[in-house]
Image (cartoon, rainbow, N blue to C red):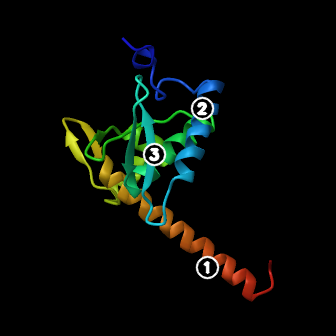
Amino acid sequence: MNAALNAPAFDERLPTELESTNAETLRQIVASQIKEDGEAVINISNVEGETQPITLSPALAHSFLELLRLVSSGRGFQLIPLDSQLTTQQAADILNVSRPHLIKLLERDEIPFDRVGRHRRIKASDLMAYKDKRDTERADALADLAEFDGEHGLL
């Protein structure tokens, strides 16, 4: 069996220096192949040397580049399907908040959740929707502050 298939995933460890370097090289190659419509066409060779073009949709190209950015920067990552049910600790970690703060958000109905026995479970899709909304509100508030500073000569 291929040694790469037996290696621990990046959700269990950080990339090695060689893996980070290789990820950056691959990121640059894929990025250089992105067309105006966002698709990327890359040529892959199998062990026999036969080359086959692979077309990555814009969403797949973007996701692949983001994954390669994480690895090339030496960071680990975890893939979470949007239909996953997360524990409160997992959700708090994704939002980068404390678990008690997340519980307050749930109790204020800011994020939908289900109960499984005594435990709360949050759909990853609901958590990401909340995160997107929160991040948009933060960006808008920062833009408003910057505009206010500019209007009042505070920059």
Mark 1 and mark 3 in contact? Answer it, CB < 8 Å. Answer: no
Q: Residue at x 39, y 55 (%)?
A: 59
Any part of residue 99 in sight: no
Q: Which quarter of the figure is the N terminus placed in?
A: top left
> Where residue 153 sits in the image (x, y, percent)?
80, 85
- Disc 1 packing (10 Å; few <14; some 14–19; many ≥20): few
Q: Residue furthest bottom?
A: 151
Q: Residue at x 45, y 45 (%)?
A: 42
Secondary element under disc 3, as helix, strand or loop, is strand
Question: 59 and 145: which one is in front?
Answer: 59
Which disc is residue 42 wearing?
3
Q: Residue at x 49, y 28 (%)?
A: 10
Using the rendered view, name the quadrant where residue 94 is placed: top left
Secondary element under disc 2, as helix, strand or loop, is helix
> Where residue 11 sits in the image (x, y, percent)?
46, 29
Mark 2 vs 3, N-terminal side: 2
- What's the residue type where badge 2 is placed? Asn
> Where residue 71 sits in the image (x, y, percent)?
56, 35
* Residue with the mark numbered 2: 22
- Disc 3 packing (10 Å; few <14; some 14–19; many ≥20): some
Q: Is residue 55 left or right of residue 113?
A: right
Can you tell which of label 1 and label 3 is closer to the viewer?
3
Residues at marks 1 and 3, CA–CA distance in whole angstroms: 42 Å
- What's the residue type where badge 3 is placed? Ile
Mark 1 vs 2, N-terminal side: 2
Q: Which quarter of the figure is the C terminus placed in?
A: bottom right
* Residue with the mark numbered 1: 144
Mark 1 vs 3, N-terminal side: 3
Q: Residue furthest left?
A: 117
- What's the residue type where badge 1 is placed? Asp
Using the rendered view, name the quadrant where residue 48 is placed: top left
